[in-house]
Image (cartoon, rainbow, N blue to C red):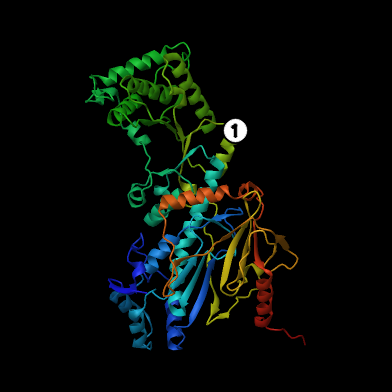
Amino acid sequence: MEEEKTANGPIAIMAKAVEGPTNPMVTPLLTDLYQFTMAYAYWKAGKHNERAVFDLYFRKNPFGGEYTVFAGLQECIKFIANFKLKEDEITFLRQTFPPSCEEGFFDYLRGIDCSDVEVHAIPEGLVVFPKVPLMRVEGPVAVVQLLETPFLNLVNYASLVTTNAARHRIVAGETKSLLEFGLRRAQGPDGGVSASKYSYLGGFDATSNVAAGMLFGIPLRGTHSHAFVSSYMSPDEIVEKSLKSSDGSKTCEDFVSLVQSWLNKIQWSPSLHGIFSETNQSELAAFTSYALAFPNNFLALVDTYDVMRSGIPNFCAVALALNDLGYKAAGIRLDSGDLAYLSCESRNFFGKIEEEFKVHGFGKMNITASNDLNEETLDALNKQGHEVDSFGIGTYLVTCYSQAALGCVFKLVEINNQPRIKLSEDVSKVSIPCKKRCYRLYGKEGYALVDIMTGENEPPPKVGERILCRHPFTESKRAYVVPQRVEELLKCYWPGSSGSPREELPTLKETRDRCIKQLEQMRSDHLRRLNPTPYKVSVSAKLYDFIHFLWLNEAPVGELQ
């Protein structure tokens, strides 16, 4: 493969177009100390260049569900494309290691990169399941060992929050707009930016995070806070009162008076009479001021004082005044109270405005709800009946409140072409040895039936041909499958020195579309919140026999006395 000199040292030309990780803190030192101590021990023993294969996978689906969405692959590829230890980093490692460590090791570190590492992975955004490798990483054992912690760091949270977002999307339904509002509650700046990116990947429509909007092109949404509303004391504070019509053909010299006249009309409307009396005038002033600033995007937070007695009437007065000038208000946001009841009452109020004043489409005004929403509250709102169009979700989404971590692991499965296995008294922690290929088998209705792992050199499953799928560890769990479609899951995203064709990294939007399409290809019983059906993950008959042969070969035999 043609090579060129770059700022990162000798690296395959395939890396030329791959930029560095989004977070500049993602460097070779973003790892656990024992990765470097193992690298030294490998080097000291002359094992550092032995060819090793590691699988990155997880053992259990999060949030009590039966599926996970894989994310973080793009950042991993960006990391290895730019993997190179700097001189100050090597100096720090030299100071950290015991004085007895040989200087030749640091010379070795100075020369390593990932040009001889191969990464095969499931495409980002696909639905994935326990035990199936998300990534297969192959290369010199010491170098690949240095990738373990950063890869796990880049995949664990990304996949967890993407899955959380997908779960919220499924509960909310396809027609509702989901807005990520979690930056202020996220675990630090990286947590906030990552959450915005991966919530969008998982099916959210927009974010309030301006930095994420700039970095990733995610649509931005936001209006104003309670502080803006309460900062006004009266309409007298509004100095600039004029507003041009949307087509620029005329100017309303006193928009404040126009708003007030509409409030009076609403107050004495036969269909609305008695719902409210005097609204809060400081709130009206805040809404009017905001509309003057953003006549094309007027969305008001209506619960600062009283939703139905003040916020909604004040909003409608401003919205109708804007309508006179050719503008259309964007809607309201509810941030407290009984969201189901208030959304229904607000919708009813808007409908009466449309009917009374003949303002077409007013009854369909967008209603956004926020206030510590999560999967459970969305489900409860659906059961109660509501009129919310958009949900702003923050804390429970970005912190993954109901599960702290996904629990991905990085296990050696082969070295020098010799399969390796990790044993445990806990069967769920026994690894599946050897370099593998992974397939998804689809049934007649187009839904995925089972994922199957085979040895690297086994013939792949074929459409229309019966194949025996076995549980990796439970002898009695087995089934024949006749697939109507076969999808190989692991693609080459970093060929190293192998010369294999490399999959191009898709855009975030393309990955998001893939995620949504994938979820549509899964049976609904696998995706439901309560008592979901487990998805079957299997191995071929040949791999099953080999796993148990190696298990018996590696496990020590006890002796009774």
Residue at point 37%, 39% (across, down)? 222
Residue at point 59%, 57% (across, down)? 61
Element type at marker 1?
A: helix
Residue farthest along the right direction in this orientation: 561
| Nearer the observer, 71 or 346 | 71
Where residue 330 sits in the image (x, y, percent)?
Answer: 39, 30
| Nearer the observer, 311 or 429 | 429
Please determine whether, in this image, residue 199 is positioned above or below residue 262: below
Please determine whether, in this image, residue 278 is positioned above or below residue 206: above
In the rendered image, the quadrant that contains the N terminus is bottom left
- Decide: few, some or many residues near mark 1? Use Cα within 10 Å; few <14, some 14-19, many ≥20: few
Please determine whether, in this image, residue 83 is positioned above or below residue 47: above
- The residue to which callout 1 is attached is 384
Residue at point 60%, 50% (across, down)? 522
Q: Is residue 338 visible?
A: no
Q: Is residue 10 visible?
A: yes
Where residue 561 sits in the image (x, y, percent)?
Answer: 77, 87
In the image, taking residue 430 as reference, residue 246 lies left or right, namely left
- Where is residue 268, by image quadrant? top left
Where residue 26 sits in the image (x, y, percent)?
Answer: 37, 65
Residue type beneath disc 1: Gln
Where residue 199 sits in the image (x, y, percent)?
Answer: 46, 49
| Nearer the observer, 252 or 113 | 113
| Nearer the observer, 462 or 174 | 462
- Where is residue 129, by image quadrant? bottom right
In the image, taking residue 327 as reference, residue 448 lies left or right, namely right
Total number of numbered discs in the rendering: 1
